[in-house]
Image (cartoon, grey):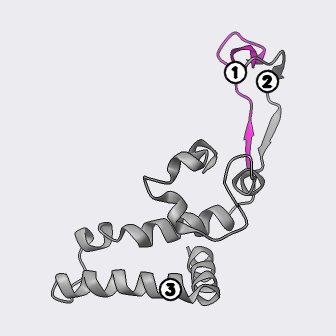
Amino acid sequence: SSTTMSFTMYEMARNPDLQQRLREEVREAFLSNDGKVTYEMIMGLKYMDNVVKEVLRHYPPLPFLDRVCTPKAGEEGYSLKAFNMDFNVPANMPIYIPQQAIQMDPQHFKDPETFNPDRFLPENKHENNMNAYM
């Protein structure tokens, strides 16, 4: 989206070292593909993928997600006992998930305020709760 592209440009302007790394990846991809843009070339831009993921972690298009509890047929709500919580979410209750707050929580992401696309590298994923990334 335009929001994601705008925040990507913003972060690249704030982090010239990351911008240079991204430019080099794109340049190498172009050179190795005779200057042609292909699906395979785009899919091979791993650092670009990590940059976009980090932009979406910092600046999600929607800061929260909203849902409505829709229990299984014949049930009056949704029990959270499976999650060791003695609570039942009533049918039709609105539920709000604070996506931005979760993704910026130091409990889930190490040093969450720092723009760090490398947190999405396979060797670094263990340092963060990737289940919190939406």
Quadrant hosting residue 86? top right
Mark 2 or 1, nearer chain start: 1
Quadrant hosting residue 47? bottom left
Are there few (<14), some (14-19), or many (20+) residues within 10 Å of tag 1? some
Q: Where is residue 6 in the image (x, y as percent from the top left)?
A: 61, 82
Q: What span is in magenta?
A: 65-83
Q: Which of 103 and 68 is in front in this view?
A: 103
Q: Where is residue 51 in the image (x, y as percent from the top left)?
A: 51, 71
Q: Position of residue 12 (x, y in %)?
A: 57, 85
Quadrant hosting residue 113? bottom right
- Residue under pointer 3: 19
Q: What residue lies at 56% left-to-right and 79% top-to-bottom? A: 5
Q: Which of 22 and 71 is in front in this view?
A: 22
- Residue 91: numbered disc: 2
Whether residue 50 is in magenta: the answer is: no
Mark 3 or 2, nearer chain start: 3
Are there few (<14), some (14-19), or many (20+) residues within 10 Å of tag 2? some
Judge left or right: residue 24 versus residue 72: left
